[in-house]
Amino acid sequence: MLESVRLSLLDRSRTRAGEPDAIALRDTVERAVRAERLGYHRFWVAEHHGVPGIASGSPPVLMAAVAARTERIRVGSGGVMLPNHQPLVVAEQFAMLEALFPGRIDLGVGRSLGFTPPVRRALRRAADEPDTFTEDLAELRSYLDGRAAVTARPRLDAPVPVYVLATGRGLAVAAAAGLPVVVGGPVLAGDRIGEALDDYRGRFRPQAPGAQPYVVLSLDVLVADSVAAARELALPEAWALAAARTNGEFPALEPVAGVASRTLSARQRSVVDAAVGRTVHGDDATVAAELDALLARTGADEVLASTSTFDRAALAESDTRLAALFAS
């Protein structure tokens, strides 16, 4: 089944302990170059603000750097958080990217606010503000397809494809808007994911001729020589999540040995175990079987792997082995 769906990468520009943030951004660009060589369909980057563990705060800027170093792979955002931006500005940024790199740009949009109260204040956002995502999305699309009173420039022959990152009621929003959806995190981990996606497909209202429901699964995947080796690779990211949940700060990635030697509280151990459990990890056969089962359960059209680990060589090897599974 793997060879019948697309495979893509989401890179969050994870920082590493003891290194400048700039290295993480250069790593992202180099990973994109490698992903194109390996045959990945698209390469997306993230938006986070004021997070020590993530260097990417401006997807359009990083996308331009990635697209300039690659030739064929689609480049996109996973995603631009609409509450943080004026829809016209987003439309102008992505129209410019599409004009410079025609036929290669994707616009993934989400609704998350800043990670902490200080970040939300810096973004001029408040947690109790009304949710205007549906209206912002419609306004954004009106600029992209030339229906708005204001013309976003540069004008394009065809609008940039828009994807909705589904959290909470995001599936319903995507269905009503007739847009493809990216599903990950708690939505994907839920017991009723198959039912939720069937509902999305049933409620899908195409806004353009030929538009069809399209589901992208976003999940962490690590492939190594054994299940134990892959589990070790998942520990740095799992520890960062545990630290965020208990200390309030999402840190840079640490080496596996450093994470393994930590004395964790019961709550931290629980978060680490749960995070590793949500990661698809193992040797080639184990990962292929788990992904096959997940695709059969969801009927998804694409897998967007968002994996990270401290060891760059191990991450590159995992990307290579994962691409081979989908090519076989």
Image: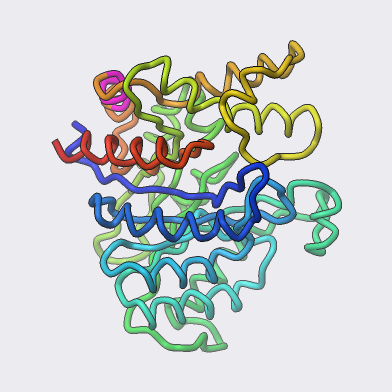
According to the image, what is the colour scheme of the structure? rainbow
Corner quadrant of residue 76: bottom left
* Frontmost residue, 76 versus 13: 13
Q: Is residue 290 magenta?
A: yes
Q: Is residue 216 above or below residue 262?
A: below
Q: Position of residue 127 (x, y in %)?
A: 81, 49
Residue occupying the point 48% across, 58% down: 108
Q: Is residue 156 left or right of residue 168?
A: left
Q: Which residues are magenta?
A: 286-291
Q: Position of residue 272 (x, y in %)?
A: 62, 20
Q: Position of residue 160 (x, y in %)?
A: 40, 71
Q: Is residue 35 above or below residue 308?
A: below
Residue occupying the point 34% across, 41% down: 319
Q: Position of residue 260 (x, y in %)?
A: 61, 18
Residue occupying the point 32% across, 54% down: 34
Q: Is residue 204 magenta?
A: no
Residue most extreme to the left: 328
> Split into 4 quadrants, where in the image is the C terminus?
top left
Q: Is residue 298 above or below residue 20?
A: above
